[in-house]
Amino acid sequence: MPPQPPGPPYAPRPPRVPAALPVLPYRKPTRGRDYWVLDDVLPDVDAVRERCLAKDEDDWVKGHPYTSETWPGLRTMPGLEPGELARVERLVRQATGARELWVQRAPGGGTLDHNCVQVVGEGESEPRPHTDSRALCRYAAVLYLNPGVPKDCGTSFYRQSLPGGRLGGNIVQAPHTNLVEALGTRFVAPDAFEEDVRVPHRYNRLLLYHANLVHSATGYFGRTPAEKRMTAVFFWMA
Ligand SMILES: [Fe+2]
């Protein structure tokens, strides 16, 4: 047996009480500054929806609960056709003042789920506050693609809820690229965040926001493919 390094024979036990999470900076999500709500975005949004519902099963990639993936529901790419996407990007440039938008290539040749349609039903997921990677996007957007989904199935912005009832922040900044890095863990208590600003669901509405704000779908809906919450999501650098 080789000589052993000095020190305790056993690794110290992990602390029973989790360390307090870092407190993020806070900026009240403000419409026109931090997020934008654009209505009646596509001239023929029904066509997008019908096109997606007509896809074969093979066209969809399956997540939870169909596979062991952690992301929920079904996904297919590309969502919008080039003309539709160009219209969305023009509106995004107008709203934000960005001269140029581009899509960052995901590291390792992976795909970024830009212009991706996602279908997630009730019970397939719950609100999961997160930020989108600062390394991959500055702006993110979600286009709601259901005529018959309740208003509370839109998107919400969240802020930290700290022990003792104090409120924390909602922004991930450099050097961190996402919320997991900023908090130093992916395991946070379910009540570590509270809803701050809710943007109601509306068919053909685009919610555009700074991707480093803590956000999540407010809720999911529907049991059948036609009823389930359908969105297209976008991620741009600018
Ligand atoms: Fe997101």
Image (cartoon, rainbow, N blue to C red):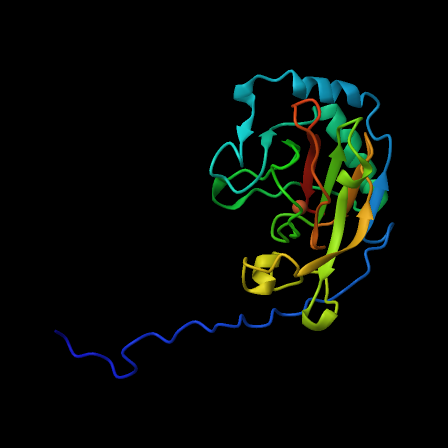
Residue 25, placed above or below residue 177: below
Give the residue furthest to the bottom.
6
Residue sitting nearer the eye, 98 or 54? 54
Is 132 rendered above or below residue 10? above
Percent across and percent down for residue 49 are: 72, 22
Q: Quadrant of the N terminus?
A: bottom left
Q: Give me the residue at 71% from left, 64% from top.
A: 161
Q: Nearer the viewer, residue 72 or 115?
A: 72
Quick check: can you spot residue 39?
Answer: yes
Position of 99 with respect to 225 (left or right) is right
Q: Position of residue 107 (x, y in %)?
A: 51, 46
* In the image, residue 176 above or below residue 157: below
The answer to whether 75 appears left or right of 83 in the picture is left
Residue at screen point 60% across, 52% down: 135
**Picture residue at 69% right of the left edge, 43% below the top:** 236
* Camera sees residue 97: no
Residue 94 at x, y percent in the picture:
85, 41
Q: Residue at x 65, y 23 (%)?
A: 225
Q: Quadrant of residue 218?
A: top right
